[in-house]
Image (spheres, coloured by chain):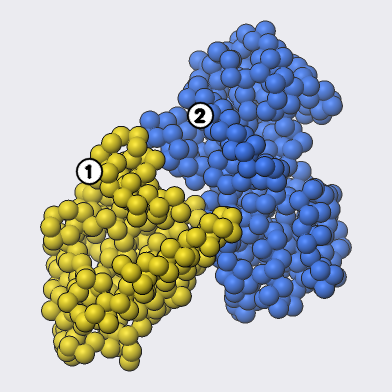
Amino acid sequence: MKHIGVDVRLLFQTGVGTYLQNFLHYLPKYAPKNISFTLYCLPQDAQFVRDIVPDSSIRTTTALWHSIGEQTTLLKLIQSDHLDLMHFTYFGHPLFYKGRCISTIHDVTPLLFATGKASTKNPLVYAIKKFVFSQTLQHQVHHSEVIITPSHTVKQQLIRLYGDSISDKIVPLYEGVSYRLLSEQVDENIVKSPYLLYVGNFYPHKNVFTLIKAFIKSNSPYLLVLAGPHDYFLNRLLTNLSDEEKEHLVVKNKPTLRELVTLYKNAEALIHPSISEGFGLPLVEAMHFGIPIIASHIPVFQEIVGNSYYSFDPYDENSISSAIQKFELSKEKKKNIPNSEFSFERMTQRTVDLYIKHVS
Amino acid sequence: MKQDLSVIIVSYNTKDLTLQCITKIQGALSKGTLNAEIIIVDNNSHDGSSEALKQYAQSHLNVKVIYNIANEGFGKPNNQGLAQAEGRYVLYLNSDVLVLEEAFLDVLIKQMDDNPLQGALTVRVNLESGSIDPASHRGFPTVWRSFCYYSGLERVTTKIPLLNILFGGYHLTNLSLAKRHEIDTPTGAFFLARKDILDVLKGFDEDFFMYGEDIDLAFRIKRLGYSIVYDPSYTVLHLKNQSGIKSKNSAATQQKTRNYFYESMAIFYKKHYEKSYPQWISCLVYAVINRKKTFL
């Protein structure tokens, strides 16, 4: 019997949370009999984890990611389990963990751009945070036997940062459409006039403010629907807009799954102006629902969608608004079809294959 | 896309050189298997270039010539070429650059195909003296890097490890010229890039008349998350300054060219850096640029 641990503390964070929920959902189907799993989660998530992976042992911890507790209590907890292999599913991990491990690195954006609340703080604090981030990541990259990335782009970015020597141990595994969306039903259209849809949070690197400005400039006959969490950045965004500008917008805070599916199904197109991503869940979802995509010309979106979308330079308002106009004017819209390469089930299966390979 | 590669050459009063340049690039293409076209944009040359090019194009099917009725600088004619280009890749080539007649473009394009994150590439661009054209191996001209370069700090620390990291950012003097690596910006004299990226960026920014537009384009390519690579496996020869600052033209022309050079510097600073520096630094930068314009 082999014993594998998986860190699922970020189960309900946007992005990474979707990844973890889907991984756990498909895990029982692919987990071999001779491997037992221990899952490390936050106390409030324990019931959810127990329901979804009944055969696993569950350890709860209050140590959050990037905290001191992660380096002390979580470290002790993991060590006390004497695992054959530990899977860290995010870039935070206990630096002094000596056991064998593999890691998932979702995104190196924070190393390339000011993201999150960090960018709102004083530059010195930001510089220190960035330094710590880069050191932690470097340690994790070198210590892990395998690094899973959600795209070839993140693999190439890691190689750019840490050199060719790590190339062989990086395995890109595409993510997909959440099982929770796949099984959800569609309601009547919630937005009465035609609209373009943005799905995601409102961190600065998502570039939504530029999108709004460009959207208004394009004199689009559509509305712009923003679906995402109600966070600090959304508030900041809205206070910087005039009432007239807000008339072009519909903000859908914390949409339910059913609302989200309905929004996708009825949208004219998905629009995504991000300046950097490790993957693009909303793009894969838009492909699944068969709606056109208007998005940034960045490497990872090129990798996922190829040429079958309307692309723009996210730094240039004019470029965004002319892409919107081009979309409106084109008679035969560039459409996307579901692509089986993007599947959480396949991703889980391949992750389990990696476990088997590395514990035997 | 019908073609693998579109080579874009702007010509202005360099008839013999332009023909030599085209002959060499044709030679290189004929050794390889790429589907390639050559687009020449003539800026209303008055040395017989347009007639010569017309004649050349008649006997070479893969050559297109666009004739301007005025000297449109560098960025605009290149964009005219880009609008006509049908290649997956575009090579911006100066009319005073001579390439080797071997299939090196096939190798470079294979390399770009294999590395989707690579947005642009340059080779080693040499001057007649045999030394490298410093413009082909540059960092972005931040205030600090420019200060180090113009004050001579870069020159005196070029060969001193660590110090060249600190002071040599303008020309990335700490990186070995013999090895392939990432740079910030190549020279527009030999600038190979993905056509899809150029289309999205709408090519060169035409606010720059001459000089600096290559740095600006590289800046915008890198900002999207693509890398730019210096690959010294191949060398081309840049017979620089045939139509630039140090040409044998009149003092008035030289002054005009100098103005373009420093104006470009100001445009670039305003476009990309002004917002990240305090106002007093910006004032100082503009003052220094103005002074440089008048007394070189």
The residue that label 1 is drawn on is B178
Please state which of residues B139 and A67 is positioned toward the viewer in this rendering. Answer: B139
Residue A336 coordinates in the image, percent (x, y):
60, 61
**Colour seen for chain A:** blue
Please indicate whether residue B182 sits to the left or right of residue B51 in the image.
Answer: right
Mark 1–mark 2 Cα distance, whole angstroms, equals 28 Å
What type is the residue that disc 2 sits on? Gln
Residue B109 coordinates in the image, percent (x, y):
30, 57
- Tell me the residue at 58%/50% (across/down): A276
Element assignment for label 2: helix
What type is the residue that disc 1 sits on? Ala
**Colour seen for chain B:** yellow
Element assignment for label 1: loop
Q: Relative to A128, is B221 above or below?
A: below
Please indicate whether residue B224 sits to the left or right of residue B56 in the image.
Answer: right
- Tell me the residue at 78%/62% (across/down): A240
The residue that label 2 is drawn on is A138
Please determine if labels 1 and 2 lie on a single subunit.
Answer: no
